Image: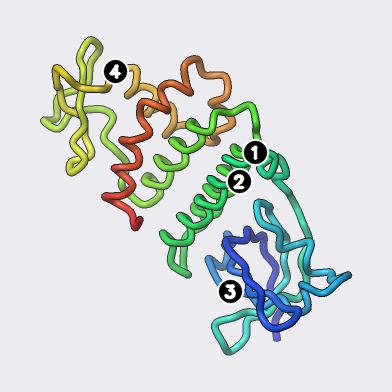
Amino acid sequence: MQQLKTRAIVLSRHNFRETDRIVNVLTPEFGKFGLIAKGSRAMKSRLAGGIELFSVNNIVFIKGRSDLATLVSSRLEKNFANIIKDIERVQYGYEVLKIIDRNTENEVEDSYFVLLELVLAGLDNLNLSLDVIRLWFLLKLLMVSGHSPNLNTDNRGVKLKDGEIYGFDVDSMAFFVQQQGRYSVNHIKFLRLLLSSSSPVSLASVSGAAQYAADLMSLAVIMRNLHLNS
């Protein structure tokens, strides 16, 4: 059988039989699929080190007749070790893995792998606000799923402008003028910056980023819950 090589991020894993593991991975070339890592729980197993959570791994596998592929070899490429130094980052890291798993089919485009690798890199940067990472991830997830908010015009098609205060209409994914609204144009500019940023790490030096992210977090969660599987 043909051996296939790829980069992989582990979404979940659980013990199987006495020394094996079932590992669910996301890859850029082959989408999402399950692997059986035979003997990976045994002492001195050469497979164990390359199927760690919060890491990028180089794997070689064989597709079988069943839904599960067989892991032939694995090697750790990049370990985001700082994540496990902070309990909140660990908890959110697990949440990210679950969100990606729930919102992807097996035949999924590589943009989800790129997004997951970037958000793990953001969580690994202990100088970056966790709220900024959360907001960046939720907005990017909406974008790759085809549900980006309108950040140029309001729900009537009028250009957003300085001096106005806005509310947000989730159904149209657009802002609207509201005297008692929660969002200024600066909030909207920050959203534009988030969506144009290739990585959350690039936002570390943005003045006021943590406060803007905290102000916008509930809005991002509402958008996600409406337009993605929760």
Q: Tell me which residue sits at (26%, 34%) in the image.
A: 150
Q: Measured from the top left, where is residue 48 in percent x and y?
A: 78, 66
Q: Mark 2 points at which residue?
A: 90
Q: Which amino acid does label 2 sit on?
A: Val
Label ID, residue 185? 4
Q: Is mark 2 on a helix, strand or loop?
A: helix
Q: Is residue 45 left or right of residue 148?
A: right
The relative height of residue 112 versus residue 178 in the rendered view (above or below) is below
Up-down relation of residue 93 to residue 131 (above or below):
below
Residue drawn at x 43%, y 21% as measured from the top left: 211
Q: Quarter holding the N terminus?
A: bottom right
Say few, some or many: other residues with alpha carbon within 10 Å of mark 2 (under 14 / 14 to 19 / 20 or more).
some
Q: Which callout, 1 or 3, points to the residue nearer the camera?
A: 1
Callout 1–callout 4 Cβ contact below 8 Å: no
Element under label 4?
helix
Left or right of 70, for residue 219:
left
Looking at the rendered structure, the secondary structure element under dot 1 is loop
Which residue carries the number 3 mark? 34
Give the mark, 1 or 3, whose residue is nearer the N terminus: 3
Report the mark closest to the observer, 3 or 2: 2
Q: Which residue lies furthest to the left in this view?
A: 156
Checking the image for residue 86, the label placed there is 1
> Which label lies toward us, 4 or 2?
2
Tell me if 216 is positioned left or right of 67 in this view: left
